[in-house]
Image (cartoon, rainbow, N blue to C red):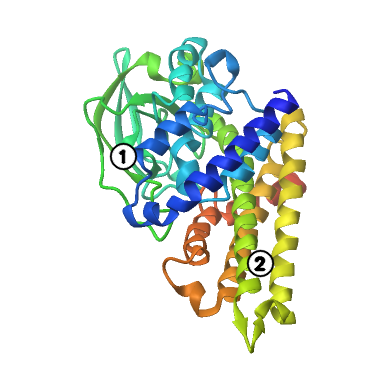
Amino acid sequence: MDQSDLAALVASARRFVRDRIVPLEERIDDQDAIPAEIVQQCKEMGLYGFTIPEEYGGLGLTAIEEAQLVFELGYTTPALRSLFGTNNGIAGHVLLEGGTDQQKKLWLPRIASGEVTASFGLTEPDAGSDPASLTTIARRAGTDWILNGTKRYITNAPMADVVMLFARTNPQQRGSRGISAFLVPTDTPGLSIGQKDRKMGQAGAWTADIYLDDVRVPAETVIGGDAGIDKGFQTAAKCLAHGRVHIAALCVGMAERLVDESVSFAQTRHAGGAPIARFQLIQGLIADSITDHRAGRALVLETARAYDDGTDKVSGPAAAKYFCSEMVCRVADRAVQVHGGAGYMRGVAAERLYRDARLFRIYEGTSQIQQVIIARGALGDAARTVA
């Protein structure tokens, strides 16, 4: 994208977030829902397809362009980004990374416009970061496949139109092998969605279980067609790597908001007849948060550049996601501390963001999984168990 166009897009997102969404944050938290008019405005702004190539109706942002946009989107409730995050991220990228030309042409324009909301169905009750435990099964029935299993904590499941579902197509293969990805419309007979999950934070971002009871799908729903059979986890890994850059940028945006909240409170809250900003221990908390935020921002931009030029699409995204998700939780904790008792009260942004931030260390791969990826990238075969 032309730099002037990117600057205009980022500025537009900044105004939208700060003028329209920030004033609605408490309503979103209380009602566990994004207002319908905001959803429509997001579609009109092209936010459902900013990473999808222009040939399919998206904006075609590179990773470093996406990061700059997501810095702005992260400044408010994560529920906003969650509306369209899977379309741009792990669900949309299943098609971008592994789909056939026909699958891309049929689905990507609808995903980019927001006509279709897509979900990513990998996690199960007993299989999260470890694909070896995946138990959803897909078995052949003539030219069709029949899927059985349960998916858990699936973002946007209650309102999804299509789900990228991962199932074991070859039970004889171990670990991440023998898994395929399927594109399954949610109105397919046998597919049902559970009740919305009640979460610690991130109200307005809906998750739920997906149940598969003899769900019959045609062969053309296999991502990548025949060539994609048993290669689903390789596709998932590529999607998750991109998603980690995205989540890292989101954490940076939230950290900026928390710094702003901390600074504003310290300047206006008085103790002993003067602002608490005069206390050096308060200054220390804020200085640490500013430093964390700046370090995270620089790391994301460096990681995004390496992702775009293809020099690092594994360890870099893992390191950025690991550092930034841990970083934003530190910044959130300090923000509550700066606010004192007020920081523990509902209705205060620091309290809500503290709850929201905690999930970042878990999804798109836990911090512990990122540590493993980073270490194995450096240590090579010496870090791997000999089979």
Q: Decide: few, some or many residues near mark 1? Use Cα within 10 Å; few <14, some 14-19, many ≥20.
A: many
Q: Is 53 situated above or below 48?
A: above
Residue at (54% x, 28% y) in the render: 93
Image spot of residue 143 (x, y percent): 32, 12
Most foreground residue, 26 or 309: 26
Q: Residue beneath label 2, please?
A: 263
Image spot of residue 316 (x, y percent): 72, 43
Q: Decide: few, some or many residues near mark 2? Use Cα within 10 Å; few <14, some 14-19, many ≥20.
A: many
Is 143 positioned to the left or the right of 360 in the image? left
Most foreground residue, 137 or 309: 309
Q: Amino acid at mark 1?
A: Pro
Q: Residue beneath label 1, please?
A: 158
Q: CA distance from mark 2 to mark 1?
A: 38 Å
Is 368 positioned to the left or the right of 281 in the image? left
Image spot of residue 59 (x, y percent): 59, 23
Helix, strand or loop at mark 2: helix
Helix, strand or loop at mark 1: helix
Image spot of residue 379 (x, y percent): 76, 49
Q: Is 281 situated above or below 118?
A: below
Residue at (77% x, 29% y) in the render: 309
Q: Earlier in the sequence, mark 2 or mark 1?
A: 1
Residue at (61% x, 73% y) in the render: 268
Residue at (60% x, 63% y) in the render: 261
Query: Furthest residue to the top?
Result: 102
Most foreground residue, 326 or 36: 36
